Amino acid sequence: MESTAWLVFVASLGGIAVALQAQFMGVIDRGLGTLEAVFINYVGGALLIGVVLLVLRGGNLANWPTLPWYTLIVGVTGLVIVGTIGYSAPRLGLIAALTVVVAVQYITGALIEHHGLLGAAPRAFEPARLFGVACMLLGTWLLVR
């Protein structure tokens, strides 16, 4: 079992990467356009992960047909994430855009878990979570207004 400290570290790296990606995507969006920024993002990522997948793991994709059908839209959701962050960050500002993204992620995640949707383990939407959502919404409003 992985330690909580390791998992928090890995998640923190993800947070740093999201902030950097949002800033870089915003610069590319302003210079070239949103679609071009998304294209550059995905081509660079596809090339890198293709090499890593082939070199380190040998390309273990044979069982992809056994996955639930809805998981296969992950590439589309990635395009939406990258495109909307790249578009909104230079227009709203990096902090406001990422705050909206995180707040909506939290609310969506809480709803998915509460109802046990899409393969998630059910976790009740307790009063503490409701308070957390209220705080996030207040903070988001303060940053965006």
Image: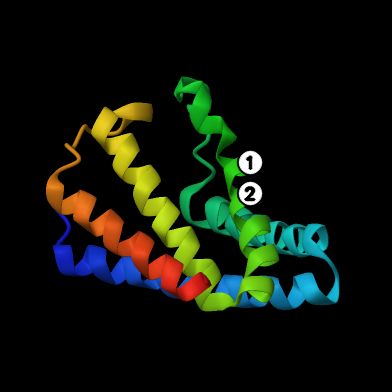
- The residue identified by callout 1 is 76
Q: Is residue 112 above or below residue 2?
A: above
Left or right of 5, for residue 102: right
**Alpha carbon distance from label 2 to label 1:** 6 Å
Q: Secondary structure at mark 2?
A: helix
Residue 14 seen anywhere in this rendered image of the structure: no
Q: Amino acid at mark 1?
A: Val
Residue 18 place in picture, x, y as percent: 50, 68
Q: Is residue 64 found left or right of 42 in the rendered image? A: left
In the rendered structure, which amino acid carries the disc numbered 2?
A: Val
Question: Which numbered marker is on residue 80?
Answer: 2
Residue 110, x across and y down, in percent = 30, 43
Q: Position of residue 119 (x, y in %)?
A: 33, 28
Using the image, determine if residue 69 lies above or below residue 105.
Answer: above
Q: Which residue is painted at 52% across and 72% down in the image? A: 145
Q: Are marks 2 and 1 in contact (CB under 8 Å)?
A: yes
Helix, strand or loop status at disc 1: helix
